[in-house]
Image: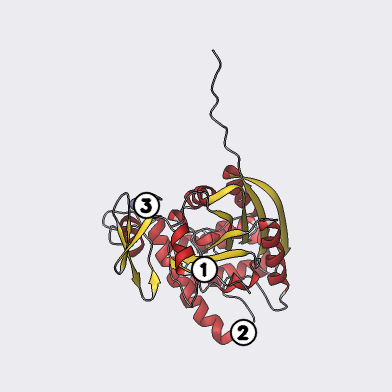
Amino acid sequence: MNAGFGEESLMSVLACPGCHRRLAREGAVLRCVACEETFAREGGYWTLVTAKTRAAMLGEDAAGRASDDPWTQWRSAMSGLEAWRKRQRGRRAHTHSSGVERSDGSSDERTRALLERAAGERDGLLVDVGAKDGRMRALAPSRCFYLAVDPSPKGEGSVLRSVAEELPVADRSAVVVFSHAAFDYFVEPERALREASRVLVDGGSLALVVSVLDAPIARARSGRSRLERLWLALRALPSAGVRATAGLVGDALFSQRAHVHYYTRDALIALVGREFDLVEVSEVRQSASTILYVLARKRARGRLRVLER
Ligand SMILES: [Zn+2]
């Protein structure tokens, strides 16, 4: 079992989520030594979110924003997820809230093996992004320091309130950035991937466990409004089949959109491949989706060449 971070080692890797410079303890708050933004504990968790992002999360800057504003969708998806979790709690005790089925523990073993390969021989910081209660700590290699960040943290341990788009972690300080069943909630996935790359050491790894959907189903679920989802569900019938379509129609009528993004396998791989070098992708087919286990390496940047004259 991974012990996590003490306060002192935590401070050594934390950075301002806005400008990535060092944070200094100042009474009850952390203050950025460069931009001077301060961050406090809220509800027992250090809250390392810039004022700008916090306003977007809370919808305080929503005036004049279009309904397809990504943070508006995020709020809607999060409340949809909470509603879904409540329904599931009574129904299927063995289904993980993320949609990754874990009745036999095999997905835990796959995740553990993925994290082992991601860390390789290295020890050091492993950042779990979108970690909820930090439950995946138990699957992290024991030689790594596990740090969990989540916009709605739960539980104890090294859990910080933070978002994937502005990680509160210093440049080149993590050996692994990991995310389990959370990537489709990252509002700005390209930005999240750039952040993952920034905080990784050279040769560091990205390890993702993401559920992906077949194209017609991903399309149908991505509709912005109920009506659009219903229309797309009906259009999916010829390719998705009666059973899947019935499920889509039911969700369109009775459920909120529960994810921020719905990815197909190809779209997800292309997205990751823009920022990282893909090492391996394996998949496990489930009844309604496919779980991808993705391992990728931080891409070596071209070095600045000094031209000889
Ligand atoms: Zn700063």
Q: Residue furthest top?
A: 309
Ligand 1 has an atom within 8 Å of the beta carbon of the residue at disc 3: yes
Of pointers 3 and 2, the one earlier in the residue sequence: 3
- SS at badge 3: loop
Residue 183 coordinates in the image, percent (x, y): 54, 59
Residue matched to label 3: 18
**Amino acid residing under circle 1:** Phe
Above or below, 12 relative to 135: above
State the CA–CA distance, disc 1 to disc 2.
31 Å
Identity, as a three-letter code, of the amino acid under mark 3: Gly
Q: Are marks 3 and 1 in contact (CB under 8 Å)?
A: no
Q: Secondary structure at mark 2?
A: loop
Q: Which mark is residue 93?
A: 2
* Residue tagged 1: 5
Side of 98 where 19 appears, left or right: left
Q: State the colouring used for the structure image.
A: secondary structure
Q: Which residue is at the far bottom?
A: 90
Looking at the image, is mark 3 or mark 1 earlier in the sequence? 1
Q: Is residue 92 left or right of residue 30?
A: right
Mark 1 or 2, closer to the camera: 1
